[in-house]
């Protein structure tokens, strides 16, 4: 397989591929990244699960690539092209219980795909992409991928071809999908060139106990690898096939559908497919046809091609006091044709908001990445621009060693930079801490040019888990009105605040809009945890200051602050950001500004905790035990509560503890890690952070998380490593990213679903690796 991939890549490199880029920005931009950035800098991990081609989701006897292709077929194959209904629309996610969709393949595929779901990447487009990726990873042709499919919101018709169907039923079913007889033979052979039949689901095709791993491969008896090749057709024609759907017990059991399908035209089509070149050419055509079966209401785009030049996250941000804008981002240059080492410089030449020459912005290399057939270098820039003159668009100049300079002008339009309304990322935040309802507060701040009419708003696209075990979340759109704040230079700040559920909250995206003008596709996962008021950008630290001199001195000498009924003060204890004295961070109703000890106590009580602690004037923590690192402190709990200056609410690294109903500050019988969980071995407690995740991309947030659930989730995604964090988060990855191992006692948070198990801590992962 390696050899054929290299040859194909070399062939692709020889073809001059400098066709015009799509005009940026485009609806395909997110899918283009997922498709082409598979290695290196800014890598998306879509291909990892099918690299190598025979990678299994968990145990031997399953192949991800085969499951993805079969999933795409089952999703499409209920299409009724006579009446323009169905097609590749992800309706299969609602049809998994049906007898025509048996086996674990479909759910596993949707669990994988949903981690890439966004407003710019529907599950059905991702399903098309998974077919492309699986075929490509297994050495098959480059199937052109169009985008624009729309996901169904409920199950559709039945009608997936079943092996026991009469031959004429197959012909009729494929005609309904839009495939004539020869295309039926081709697409079935192209699908059945990788993977095989499972005895567990199809015992009348593969008898139990007869095949390695109870899995009878279509065209490779060794099971050493599966390859996208003409073997299935060649062996059928030669008469030495081992395809369990053409020979063996399936014949007597009338389940030999491949044999009956292949011979329906007296072997004419299958004979042609026995030629390796014909096989690849025809598969490219019919597999594209398969994913392009969509209802007439869907308009598919032109096939996705890699951009030669692509701006990456260009962002204007107003900088205090308002006289300048910072303009940051990267330019991705395709280096497949113009070699990276031949590029001497990449510059942006921009126009001001009146269309007059603005200036030149230089770049420096940020990293290199690659895909199956392409390579890219990213050039980063950070410029300061006069906020009055501002910027409206830029062109990109790529200077190549030897004197030539390419100017890229986005098909004559220039790369537009919208300055009327811009996201103010430093002032925006998604709070790390959840409130009593397990929601997080999301604050979005935008700057609008005061002279431009209108009020900005936020278009928020959140993900919401679907009920009844459906694995793909739903995208829920909401519009948040924004309130005007102060003006700075030519801009006025606006803000919107909302609650988002904690689960999936890191996967929301949003646009800041001003009528049809937009700053689009921002990710909540890229927002800081803390909103920094405009002009105070330097104090970005979330840790309490080491000295408490910045805090207003207590205004009262009261020593017995009011407690909530049933609660008693337990005194002042030490705390630290690296090992929390109480594990649960609560955000009481009314927020930090109203915090009192009684409020923290009632919040903790409503969450089911018997210990409460206030800290640093406005923070509230809950738990049932204190961490082993907590020690009684003789001083330091001297900061006034934000909600009542007469009370003390802890201090810097000091927590004012209280207990309910006689509860005391005792160390827990520590929830323990397990030596082995479902074949994963414990490796220790490791640091994690939201800015640089150690594991990913798959993430499950689950209030009743157990180590076993997390292991199962990651195993289904095909990941070797899982980590449990913060009692309820489960992270999967192929390997552990850069991190540091810390003391075992720091991963002491009980798993939400089993208090005897340890599931990390805030920013601490209990890490397990497949043996
Ligand atoms: C007459 C039409 C077809 C019938 C009756 C049929 C039936 C089946 C059956 C019974 C299996 C075994 C599934 C398992 O044990 O997990 C299978 C596997 C598979 N089918 Fe088909 N199929 C048909 C056409 C297609 C087409 C058109 C494609 C895609 C282009 C396709 C792709 C696959 C793949 C990739 C597998 C392997 C799955 C794995 O190894 O997990 N099939 N098919
Ligand atoms: C099926 O359609 C293809 C493409 O339109 C055509 O080339 C082929 O001859 C057709 N086959 C049959 C059996 O009609
Ligand atoms: C069938 O025969 C061909 C030609 O000898 C060979 O390449 C192929 O591996 C054989 N297939 C099987 C399943 O033995
Ligand atoms: C088609 O090929 C199969 C397998 O080689 C063979 O058994 C069958 O007789 C052939 N059918 C025709 C009509 O040639
Ligand atoms: C597809 O294009 C037609 C014609 O331009 C348009 O009326 C329709 O709204 C489009 N559909 C979608 C889903 O964009
Ligand atoms: C916040 O939590 C409450 C209670 O669980 C829930 O009803 C509400 O929908 C949540 N809000 C959001 C935006 O998720």
Image (tube, rainbow, N blue to C red):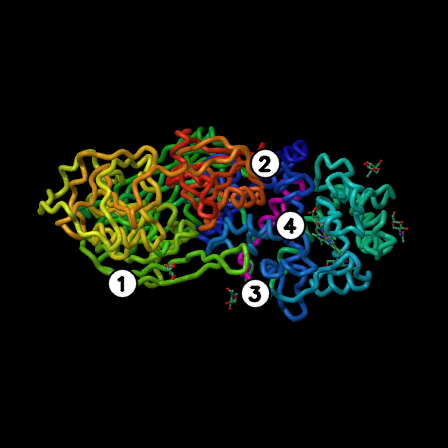
Task: Looking at the picture, tell me which residue is in the foreground, 106 or 358.
Answer: 106
How far apart are labels 2 and 4 at the CA level? 21 Å
Q: Tell which circle, 3 or 4, labels the residue nearer the N-terminal end.
A: 4
Mark 1 within 8 Å of ligand 6, using the beta carbon: no
Crowding at dot 4, Cα within 10 Å, few <14 / some 14-19 / many 20+, comes out as many
| For residue 3, side relative to residue 652 (left or right) | right
How far apart are labels 1 and 4 at the CA level? 48 Å
Task: Looking at the picture, tell me which residue is in the foreground, 714 or 241.
Answer: 714
Q: Residue furthest bottom?
A: 83
Q: Secondary structure at mark 1?
A: loop
| For residue 457, side relative to residue 760 (left or right) | left
Q: Which residue is mark 3?
A: 154
Q: Which residue is painted at 44% across and 40% down in the image?
A: 759
Residue 593, given in percent of the width and then of the height, sits at 21, 52
Q: Which residue is painted at 27% across and 43% down in the image?
A: 326
Q: Tell which circle, 2 or 3, labels the residue nearer the N-terminal end.
A: 3
The kind of secondary structure the magenta stretch mainly shows is loop
Q: Secondary structure at mark 4?
A: helix
How far apart are labels 2 and 3 at the CA level? 36 Å
Residues rendered magenta in the picture? 128-154
Q: Tell which circle, 1 or 2, labels the residue nearer the N-terminal end.
A: 1
Residue 153 part of the magenta segment = yes
Q: Which residue is mark 4?
A: 105
Residue 92 part of the magenta segment = no
Q: Which residue is mark 2?
A: 679
Crowding at dot 1, Cα within 10 Å, few <14 / some 14-19 / many 20+, comes out as some
**Residue 654, quarter of the rendered image:** top left
Q: Which residue is painted at 66% across and 61% down in the image?
A: 98
Q: Which residue is mark 1?
A: 455
């Amino acid at each position: 397989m390696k050899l054929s991939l290299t040859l194909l890549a070399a062939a692709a490199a020889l073809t001059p591929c400098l066709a015009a880029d799509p005009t940026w920005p485009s609806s395909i931009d997110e899918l283009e990244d997922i498709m082409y950035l598979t290695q290196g800098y800014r890598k998306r991990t879509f291909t990892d699960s099918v690299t190598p081609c025979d990678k299994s989701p968990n145990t031997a006897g399953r192949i991800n690539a085969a499951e993805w292709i079969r999933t795409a077929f089952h999703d499409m194959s209920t299409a009724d092209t006579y009446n323009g209904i169905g097609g590749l629309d992800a309706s299969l996610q609602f049809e998994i219980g049906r007898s025509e969709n048996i086996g674990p393949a479909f759910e596993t595929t949707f669990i994988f795909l949903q981690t890439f779901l966004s407003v710019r990447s529907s599950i059905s487009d991702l399903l098309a992409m998974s077919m492309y990726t699986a075929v490509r990873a297994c050495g098959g042709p480059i199937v052109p991928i169009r985008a624009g499919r729309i996901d169904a919101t409920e199950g559709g018709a039945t009608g997936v071809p079943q092996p026991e169907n009469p031959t004429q039923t197959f012909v009729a079913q494929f005609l309904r999908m839009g495939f004539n007889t020869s295309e039926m033979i081709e697409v079935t052979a192209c699908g059945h060139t990788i993977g095989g039949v499972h005895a567990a689901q199809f015992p009348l095709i593969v008898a139990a106990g007869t095949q390695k791993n109870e899995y009878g491969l279509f065209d490779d008896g060794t099971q050493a690898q599966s390859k996208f090749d003409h073997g299935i057709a060649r062996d059928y024609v030669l008469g030495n096939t081992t395809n369990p759907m053409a020979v063996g017990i399936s014949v007597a059991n009338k389940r030999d559908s491949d044999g009956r399908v292949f011979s329906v035209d007296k072997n004419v089509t299958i004979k042609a497919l026995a030629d390796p070149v014909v096989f690849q050419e025809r598969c490219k055509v019919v597999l594209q046809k398969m994913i392009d079966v969509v209802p007439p209401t869907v308009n598919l785009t032109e096939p996705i091609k890699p951009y030669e030049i692509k701006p990456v996250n260009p962002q204007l941000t107003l900088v205090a006091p308002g006289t300048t804008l910072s303009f940051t981002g990267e330019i991705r240059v395709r280096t497949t044709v113009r070699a990276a080492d031949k590029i001497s410089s990449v510059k942006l030449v921009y126009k001001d908001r009146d269309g007059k020459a603005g200036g030149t912005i230089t770049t420096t290399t940020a990293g290199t990445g690659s895909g199956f057939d392409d390579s890219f270098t990213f050039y980063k820039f950070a410029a300061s621009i006069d906020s009055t003159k501002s910027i409206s668009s830029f062109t990109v100049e790529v200077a190549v060693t030897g004197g030539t300079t390419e100017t890229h002008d986005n098909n004559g339009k220039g790369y537009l930079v919208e300055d009327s309304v811009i996201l103010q990322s430093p002032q925006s935040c998604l709070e790390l801490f959840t409130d009593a309802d397990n929601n997080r507060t999301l604050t979005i701040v935008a700057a609008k040019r005061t002279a431009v009419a209108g009020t900005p708003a936020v278009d928020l696209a959140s993900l919401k888990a679907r009920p009844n075990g459906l694995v793909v979340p739903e995208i829920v759109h909401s519009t948040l009105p924004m309130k005007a704040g102060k003006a700075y230079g030519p801009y006025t700040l606006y803000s919107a605040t909302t609650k988002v559920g904690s689960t999936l909250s890191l996967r929301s995206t949003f646009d800041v809009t001003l009528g049809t003008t937009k700053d689009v596709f921002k990710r909540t996962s890229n927002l800081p945890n803390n909103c920094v008021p405009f002009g105070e950008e330097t104090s970005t630290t979330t840790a309490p200051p080491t000295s408490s001199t910045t805090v207003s001195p207590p205004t009262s000498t009261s020593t017995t602050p009011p407690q909530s009924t049933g609660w008693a003060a337990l005194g002042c204890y030490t705390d630290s950001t690296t090992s929390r004295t109480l594990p649960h961070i609560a955000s009481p109703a009314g927020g930090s500004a109203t915090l009192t000890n009684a409020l923290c106590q009632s919040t903790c009580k409503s969450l089911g905790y018997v210990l409460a602690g206030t800290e640093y004037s406005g923070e509230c923590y809950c738990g049932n035990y204190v961490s082993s690192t907590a020690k009684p402190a003789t001083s330091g709990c001297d900061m006034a509560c934000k909600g009542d200056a007469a009370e003390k609410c802890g201090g810097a690294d000091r927590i004012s503890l209280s207990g309910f109903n006689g509860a005391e500050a005792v160390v827990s019988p520590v929830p323990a890690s397990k030596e082995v969980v479902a074949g994963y071995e414990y490796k220790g407690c490791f640091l994690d952070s939201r800015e640089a995740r150690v594991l990913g991309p798959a993430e499950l947030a689950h209030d009743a998380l157990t180590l076993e659930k997390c292991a199962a989730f990651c195993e289904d995604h095909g990941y070797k490593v899982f980590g449990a964090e913060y009692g309820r988060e489960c992270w999967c990855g192929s390997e552990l990213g850069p991190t540091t191992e810390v003391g075992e006692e720091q991963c002491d948070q009980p798993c939400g679903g089993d208090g005897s198990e340890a599931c990390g801590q805030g920013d601490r992962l209990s890490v397990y690796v497949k043996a």
